[in-house]
Amino acid sequence: MRQKKGIPFDRANVKQTKRIQTIARVSADLFSTKGYLETSMDDVARAAKVTKGGVYHYFRSKTEILHFICSTYVHLDLENLEQALSTARGGVEKVRLVAFRHIDHYAAHASAAKTLLNEAYNLPPRHFREVKAIEKKYFDIVARVLSEYLKGRIEKHTLTALTFTFFGMMNWIYSWYNPKGPLRPEELSRIIFEIFTKGVEGASLSKRKGT
């Protein structure tokens, strides 16, 4: 951070932040491919190109690294979300925004997303509950967006099912999607958005017709 009144740029803080981010990034790569339990601190140190003591300088344990990865990613989902939604016009545009934003975050942080989805259960109970509480806030916001899109004409249990379905479509891509492949994130976002919204509209029509 650059300070006021001509105080020199704090290079030490920048270097420390970059080192923390590097350790977290390579750890997420390892946890998402090799597995959290199967990854050692020696593996992390080698991948980060630092000594094991260097890793411990920034993180007291492998569990602390996992917590940093998971909490950072779930906070990313919430960051400025309400502000972005407040500028979107209409329910359908808000659904589109959520889909594009969610997939964009995944594409930019795929290893962290996979680690959250597959390894968060390895966190100590207190940290696991903390991460889940943030995820619940995100879920509730998206449920509210879907309710607005459907103009509130939906029962609570159905809204819950639709919200989980929407997240399922967006999250299951971890099992097959390569952000570096030919299918660009924005195109995948469009596909998911159109399939979901058109499917919901079709289901709503079927319900009104009694079929």
Image (tube, rainbow, N blue to C red):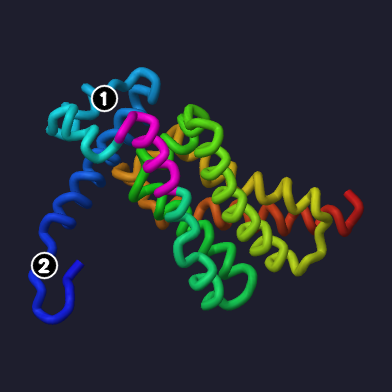
Residue 8 placement, left or right of 125? left
- Secondary structure category for the residue under label 2: loop
For the point 36% across and 51% down, the residue is 184
- Determine which quarter of the picture holds residue 6: bottom left
Q: Main secondary structure of the magenta part?
A: helix
Residue 180 visible within the image = yes
Residue 160: image location, x then y, percent: 73, 49
Pointer 1 residue: 41
Pointer 2 residue: 9
For the point 44% across and 46% down, the residue is 71
Residue 208: image location, x then y, percent: 87, 59
Q: Which kind of residue does numbered mark 1 sit on?
A: Met
- Secondary structure category for the residue under label 1: helix
- The stretch of residues the image draws in magenta is 60-73
Residue 62 placement, left or right of 79? left
Residue 118 visible within the image = no
Toward the right, the furthest residue is: 210
Q: Earlier in the sequence, mark 1 or mark 2?
A: 2
For the point 60% across and 55% down, the residue is 137
Toward the top, the furthest residue is: 38
Residue 19: image location, x then y, percent: 19, 45
For the point 49% across and 59% down, the residue is 78
Of 18 and 10, the residue lying toward us: 10
Specify whether residue 189 is painted magenta: no
Instruction: Classify mark 1: residues with Cα within 10 Å, few (<14), some (14-19) or many (20+).
Output: some
Q: Which kind of residue does numbered mark 2 sit on?
A: Phe
- Determine which quarter of the picture holds residue 50: top left
Residue 96: image location, x then y, percent: 54, 63
- In the rendered image, the vertical position of residue 87 relative to residue 210, given as above or below: below
- In the rendered image, the vertical position of residue 90 relative to residue 134, given as above or below: below
